[in-house]
Amino acid sequence: MTARTVLEIGTLGGYSTIWLARALPADGRLITLEYEAKHADVARENIQRAGLSTEVDIRVGAALDTLPVLAEEDQGPFDLIFIDADKPNNPHYFEWALKLARPGTLIVADNVIRDGAVIDAKSADPSVQGVRQFLELLDHDTRVTATAIQTVGSKGYDGFVLALVTDTDTR
């Protein structure tokens, strides 16, 4: 099955946005959320150069402010949700992802290994703590089936989470 609706939390320069948008079918749409206006401007230029401006809607502002607006606009459910923003807010992004999902939605969260730093429960790094809290939520949430996959490359080692939404009932 092809994802027709994609939500990306964290745009930066639009690299992932472009790859995600290229995979969309002709009637697909992608909404991407970027906190910094200057990053959104760079992404907008890159997306335009890639010929994908009509498929991509860039929203500027704090994602935790923008996500409720998407819900009010009845933008969901999304088929794919990609979380790649400030890591301290990953637990909150995950909760919003579930609100904007349906059974069968795939949630992908990037940078969850952090060179192995996530194993240190006493780390003072807010990014590490955000990822740890996110992983803890995944472990206890019966609405998803998830796994973390470690990657190794030129940037060292990191990884991502794949979480399949199996139920959206919050009971």
Image (cartoon, grey):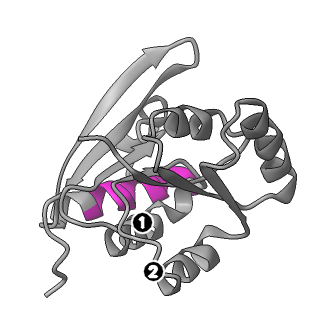
Q: Is the C terminus in the top left, top right, bottom left or bottom right quadrant?
A: bottom left
Q: Amino acid at mark 2?
A: Asp
What is the CA distance from the residue labelled 1 to the residue labelled 2? Answer: 22 Å
> Which residue is disc 2 drawn over?
74
Quick one: SS at disc 2? loop
Q: Residue furthest front?
A: 26
| Residue nearer the viewer, 105 or 30 | 30
Q: Amino acid at mark 1?
A: Pro
As for residue 127 lying within the magenta part, the answer is yes
Q: Quadrant of residue 67?
A: bottom right
As for residue 28 lying within the magenta part, the answer is no
> Which residue is disc 1 drawn over?
91
Q: Is residue 49 left or right of residue 120?
A: right
| Residue nearer the viewer, 148 or 29 | 29
Q: Is residue 78 left or right of residue 36?
A: left
Which residue appears at 41% of the width and 36% of the height?
Answer: 113
- Compared with residue 25, is residue 152 higher up or lower down, i.e. above or below? above
Q: Position of residue 85 (x, y in %)?
A: 59, 52
Which residue appears at 29% of the width and 31% of the height?
Answer: 149
Q: Nearer the viewer, mark 1 or mark 2?
A: 2
| Residue nearer the viewer, 67 or 21 | 21
Q: Residues within 10 Å of mark 1 (few under 14, many from 20)?
A: many
Q: Which residues are magenta?
A: 125-137
- Compared with residue 78, is residue 3 higher up or lower down, i.e. above or below? above
Q: Is residue 13 visible?
A: yes
Q: Position of residue 57 (x, y in %)?
A: 65, 58
Magenta span: predominant SS is helix
Q: Is residue 8 visible?
A: no
Q: Is the N terminus in the top left, top right, bottom left or bottom right quadrant?
A: top left
Q: Is residue 17 left or right of residue 118?
A: right
